[in-house]
Image: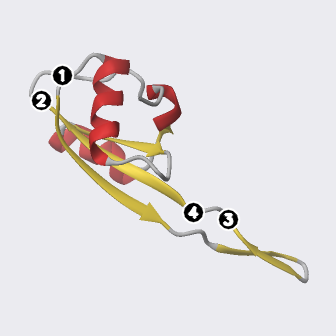
Amino acid sequence: MKDPRDIIIAPHISEKSMRLIEENNTYTFKVALNANKTEIKKAIEEIFGVKVLKVNTARMPGKMKRLGIHRGRTPEWKKAMVKLAEGDRIEIY
């Protein structure tokens, strides 16, 4: 099994993710591109000691950027929206 800290990269903080925490008890994380939902669920439960009810994932494509005449892309990444059981909280935000 992979190390849980290799699967969960960082919390993803945005206006939408903060609203999801308040309304649905759903936390958003940046995760490894090759991680699947069951690996993400096990990693969150092991790292934070909470009960995960549901995991949704989305691959975010890289955006086009340019600097002068040079053009390129930012790397693509994967995010996971993790719904926790009632009463559980993650105190990283």
Q: Amino acid at mark 1?
A: Asp
Assess whether mark 1 and mark 4 are in contact (beta carbons under 8 angstroms): no
Alpha carbons under labels 3 and 2: distance apart: 34 Å
Q: Earlier in the sequence, mark 3 or mark 2?
A: 3
Assess whether mark 4 and mark 3 are in contact (beta carbons under 8 angstroms): yes
| Dot 4 crowding, Cα within 10 Å, few <14, some 14–19, many 20+ | few
Which callout, 4 or 1, points to the residue nearer the camera? 4
Q: Amino acid at mark 4?
A: Glu
Alpha carbons under labels 3 and 1: distance apart: 34 Å
The image position of residue 33, as x and y in percent, is 49, 53
Which callout, 4 or 2, points to the residue nearer the camera? 4
Assess whether mark 1 and mark 2 are in contact (beta carbons under 8 angstroms): yes
Residue 46, above or below 83:
above
Instruction: Give the residue pinned by disc 4.
Output: 76
Instruction: Give the residue pinned by disc 1.
Output: 88
Q: Quadrant of the N terminus?
A: top left
Question: Which structural element holds mark 3?
Answer: loop
Q: Amino acid at mark 3?
A: Thr
